[in-house]
Amino acid sequence: MGKGPDQHRLCKDHGPFVVAWGQTTSCPICGELCPSDPEHTPRNRGFHILGAETGVGYWSAALGREVGSKAEEEKIMNANGYIRESDLPQHFWEDETNRRREIIRKQEDEVQQLQLHLDNGSSMEEAIQKTFTAERCLSGELDDIYEHVVDFSIPKENI
């Protein structure tokens, strides 16, 4: 037997019938595929899928699960540190997207510069030394491009 609530179906010739969740929705008498029975169709599809046909609560798309009320959803979201989209600064998504695109563009420029050195006959080690000079690495210029500080120090246990 499948998981979930029974499905109420309505055959136009033989009337209503119930099938187990996940089973075929054909009429057991004539074998014709049947639509759901409108008399037993819940108001809230998300809740029906969960098997709670009581009509209490609703499916919260923000949390990805069912909640009893808006107040409960709000309480859970606040406890988990969620931020409402309406509380974000104006143009937040556009500004963040543009910032990330600019970082990717700069990274692509670095890769092209590295490839140029390789095409001119440098080995990979030489191309890296020419592209990512010590002055650039120590100045913090590359930290803005790559956002993650790379630690090149040798662990003490390996010395």
Image (cartoon, rainbow, N blue to C red):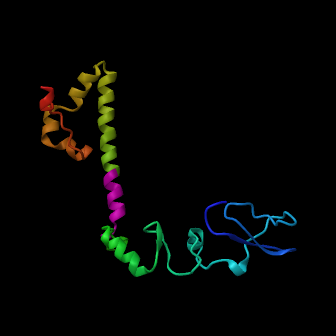
Q: Is residue 92 left or right of residue 41?
A: left
Dividing the picture into quarters, in which one does residue 154 lie? top left
Image quarter of residue 104: top left
Q: Is residue 148 shown to the viewer in this render? A: yes
Query: Is residue 88 at all visible to an observer of this figure?
Result: no
| Residue 18: image location, x then y, percent | 74, 71
The quarter of the image holding the N terminus is bottom right
**Prevalent SS, magenta region:** helix
Reply above or below: 75 against 151: below
Q: Establish if 128 lies above or below 109.
A: above
Q: Where does the image place residue 55, in percent across and percent down from the top left?
A: 56, 81
Q: Residue at x 84, y 64 (%)?
A: 32
The residue at the point 25 percent across, 44 percent down is 145
The residue range painted magenta reads 89-100
In this picture, is 71 found above or below 149?
below
Depth check, front residue: 20 or 14: 20
The foreground one among 153 and 131 is 153
**Image coordinates for residue 80, horizontal then vertical, percent:** 32, 67
Q: Does residue 56 belong to the magenta stretch?
A: no
Instruction: Count how many numbered circles sit on residues in the image.
Output: 0
Residue in view at x 82 percent, y 66 percent: 27
The quarter of the picture where the C terminus appears is top left
Looking at the image, residue 45 sits to the left or right of residue 19; the answer is left
The front one of 152 and 118 is 152
Q: Position of residue 74 (x, y in %)?
A: 37, 76
Q: Residue at x 46, y 78 (%)?
A: 68
| Image vertical order of residue 103 relative to residue 67, above or below | above
Reply yes or no: does residue 94 show up in magenta.
yes
